[in-house]
Image (cartoon, rainbow, N blue to C red):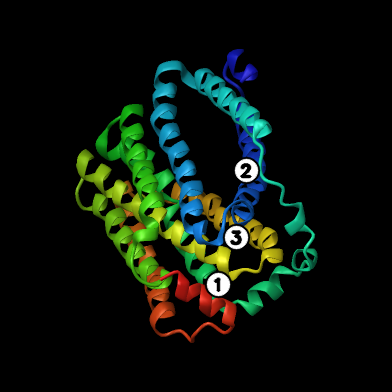
Amino acid sequence: AVWAQGGGPPLAGVYAAALVLATCQAFFDPCLTTSVPELVDDADIETATGFELSTQSLAGLAGALLGALAVDAAGVAGLAAGCAAAYAGAALLVAGARFRDAAASAESPEQESRRPLRRILGELPYVRRILVCFTAANLFTAAVFVVIPLYTRSVLHGGGGTVALLEASLGAGALVGAFTGTRVPGRPTVAGAWCLGLMAVALALPGLFAHRLVIAGCLAVAGWCAGAVSVRFVALFQRLVPTADKPGFFAVMQAVLGASLPVASLVFGSAGDLFSPRTLCLVQGVGLLPAACALALLGSGAPAPETPVEAEAVGGAR
C-alpha cells in the first residue's frame, strides 16, 4: 500500500504481492476448514460449513462490488490502501478471537497418528473420485474470473461498474448457495451432478445472448450452484475423513482445487487473445458436462462405500 501511494508500482512488485497473499491464504483456508468439527457438534457440521463458506462468499461479494469501483474512483493506490486496511482489520479480529479449549481432543490417540495422503485417499476411493471430478470442473469454473473482464470490455463495452455488477451477481449467488446448499435434496454426488449441469447451462448462455441483465442472472445461478455444491461436499468430507487425517487432507484439497485457478487463468487468458469471450463462455459450459456426467455415474452406478464409516456418512448426508 505504501509503495502504491508513491506512484505506480512495477508489474513485478504486483505479482510478488499477489504471490505472498495467495501463500498466506493457502495456509489459512485449510486450517479454517479443519477447525470446524472441533468447534461445533457433529449435528451442526453442515450448518457450520455453510456459515464458513458464506463468509467467503460475502467477502467475495463485497470485494467484487468495491474493488472494481475503487479502481475506477481511486486507482491502484486506493485499491491497495483499502486491501491493506481490510487485512489489518482481519488480523486484529483473528488475534482477539477466543475458542473453547480443544486440547483434550488433540491428545487423543486417533489424532496423534499422521498418515500419508496417498494412504488416506487409497482407503477412501469415493472421496478420491469426487476430488478428481471437481478438480476437472474447477478448470472451467475458475475461468469465469478471466472471462468476466474480457466479456465486459469486448462484448458489453462496459467499465468497472459493469465488472462490479457481474462479479457481485456471482458472489451473491454463491452466498445464497452457501446458506441453502444443505436443503438441496438427494445424495451429494447426484445433487452435485445436477448443480454442475445447471452451472454449465448458466455459463454457456452468455455465449448466445449478450445482454447485461441476462448475464448477471446467469452468473447468479452459476454462483448459487458453486456455493451449494461446496457446502454439500465439504460437509461430506468432514464426516468421511478421519479426524487425524483432516489437516493434511483439507490442505491438499485446497492445493489441488486452488491449482486450477492459475492453470485456468493461463489457458483462458491466452485463449482470449485468439477467441472471442462468447466462444470462451461456450467452452466453459461444454467443459463442465463431463464432470457432471462423471458425478452422476458415481452417484448411481458406482460401488457402494467400502467402509462402515463412509456408508454411515453418505447416508446421513442425504
Q: Is the residue marked by circle 2 packed among few (<14), some (14-19), or many (20+) residues within 10 Å?
A: few
Label 1: which residue?
A: 127
Secondary structure at badge 3 equals: helix
Residue 11 at x, y percent in the picture: 59, 29
Q: Residue at x 45, y 32 (%)?
A: 63
Identify the mark at residue 311; answer none if there is no mark: none
Residue 141 at x, y percent in the picture: 42, 55
Q: Residue at x 39, y 66 (%)?
A: 192
Please state which of residues 245 and 287 is positioned toward the viewer in this rendering: 245
**Is residue 159 at all visible to an observer of this figure?**
no
Secondary structure at badge 2 equals: helix
Label 2: which residue?
A: 25
User: Which is nearer the N-term, disc 2 or disc 1?
Assistant: 2
Calculate the distance from the C-alpha at mark 2 to the C-alpha at mark 3: 14 Å
Please state which of residues 171 and 161 is positioned toward the viewer in this rendering: 171
Which image quarter: residue 292? bottom left
